[in-house]
Image (cartoon, rainbow, N blue to C red):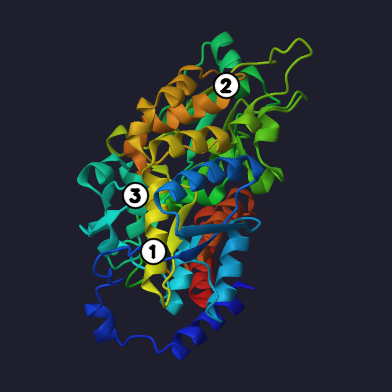
Amino acid sequence: MLKKIVSLLLLTAMLLGCLSAAQAESAPGFAVPEGGYDGSEVTITFYHTMGSNLTAVLDTYIAEFNELYPNIHIEYTSVGNYDDVRDQVSTEITVGTQPNIAYCYPDHVALYNLAQVVATLDNLIASQETVTRADGTTEILGLTDEQKADFIEGYYNEGMQFGDGLMYTMPLSKSTEVLYYNKTFFDENGLTVPTTWEEMEAVCAKIKEIDPNSIPLGYDSEANWFITMCEQYGSPYTSATGDHFLFNNEQNRAFVKMFREWYQKGYLTTQTLYGAYTSGLFVSTTETKSYMSIGSSAGATYQRPAANADGTYPFEVGIATIPQVSEDNRKVISQGPSVCIFEKENPQEVVASWLFVKFLTTNVNFQAEFSMASGYVPVLKSVSDNEVYAAFLDSADGGDYISALSAKVCLEQEDAYYTSPAFNGSSTARDQVGMLLAKCLTADDGGDVDAMIERAFQDAVDECEYSF
């Protein structure tokens, strides 16, 4: 399916008469019309993946936005999951009917960029054009220095991961990975929550001594684990320019070999090997269980055990930052949807789309309400000062208010977030390193583990090159 989409987009790019290399090099991106938004009546279409609980929040803020801009009509559609949005938008691009705004991940934007239909945001962000609202107040079209500084840096910088230094997306709501642990078990057995991978190995060994039937650690995403380790070690993974697939190197093979040894000792499992999200093992009441689980911060409620008849929980859940290689280079993955804006024949549609995106991404109240309703974390630092959100964070615990505890941990590690380079083929690299890690944990090494791992790495690179 994805290869068909790529072919269609490449054909579309040819039919649209893509810019020559020289033209593209000097192209300034979307040109803001003089005067910015002229007040004309436009309809903006928005594709997302929100359920009814989130669209209720969205409706409230669309109404607020329309009080300021009554001639900008927002029509939204919930389109399945993130990949469904990607597939529908990609198909519509080939006939020029793509929406104005869409939920996106970086690799989706890299795909859309084959047809050069994503509006770059740099000129909009920098614009000093004054826009007059319906109530007579004004705002500049772009972002103020204070607004830019308020974004959590790692989330904001995701929009510039495409190799040309230009801004293609704005962060809407985010998640990351956190370490869930059975706090009751840790307290009863005098265990310390691991902050490094070296400490993690030692804690897993102690847990196996206490409960030989356990699998101490479950890690949901093999791909996230591999990519995060590259970031923590500072070793190559991919590049948006030049040679794209750089992950076959000595350092990366070494950490995969280390985790294989842990697997052989019964210390860990992953989503692929377990056959389901490892939260199921973490909340298990059967003989085999885990006492630590690394998974999405947005899935905190799935890491909480079912309540007893009296409303209490079998154990208290603790949440911490995932282990690091070194405190000097803390890295935690940034996930969750951003939004991109598409080029249109009418530039007022692009400007109006930007005003709506700016409204959602810089609005502290929206960010607070959306976060509490979704389980994702806000993209603005100042949301912590919002009274309702501050009360939400103050309620954090390892039981009824586990989502608040998860959000609190996410906000405390804001300086550690990273994003990977985005290019056509980056999603393939992600898939391949995930499969590579799962394979290397379990494969028969034939008596030569190093040779097996080297072959697996080369096979993964070859598959990336073939698919690219």
- Which residue position holds label 1? 246
The Cα atoms of the two marked residues, 2 and 1, are separated by: 42 Å
Q: Disc 3 versus disc 1: distance between alpha carbons? A: 25 Å
Q: Position of residue 165 (x, y in %)?
A: 27, 64
Q: Which residue occupies the foreground of this view, 172 or 137?
A: 137
Report the residue at 69% width, 32% height from top. 281
Residue designated by label 2? 401
Which is nearer the N-term, disc 2 or disc 1?
1
Q: Which mark is residue 395?
A: none
Tell me the amino acid under the disc marked 3.
Answer: Tyr
State the image coordinates of residue 262 (x, y, percent, origin top left). Answer: 55, 38
Label 1 secondary element: loop
Q: Callout 3: helix, strand or loop?
A: helix
Question: Looking at the picture, how far across and down is residue 250, in whole percent?
Answer: 38, 55
Q: Nearer the viewer, residue 277 or 465?
A: 277
Q: Is residue 340 left or right of residue 271?
A: left
Residue at point 39%, 64% (across, down)? 246
Q: Is residue 176 positioned above or below 402 on the image?
A: below
Mark 3 packing: few (<14 Cα in 10 Å), some, or many (20+)? many
Asked whether the residues under the numbered discs 2 and 1 touch, taking CB atoms below 8 Å apart as contact, a structural biologist would say no
**In-image side of 53 versus 113 (left or right):** right
Which of the image's four quarters has the N terminus? bottom right
Residue 156 numbered mark, or none: 3
For the residue carrying disc 1, how many other residues have a C-alpha within 10 Å: few (<14), some (14-19), or many (20+)?
few
Q: Secondary structure at mark 2?
A: loop
Q: Amino acid at mark 1?
A: Leu
Quadrant of residue 309 in the image? top right
Q: In the image, 265: left or right of 202?
A: right
Instruction: Name the amino acid type tagged 2.
Output: Tyr
Mark 3 vs 1: CB contact within 8 A = no
Q: Position of residue 125 (x, y in %)?
A: 27, 57
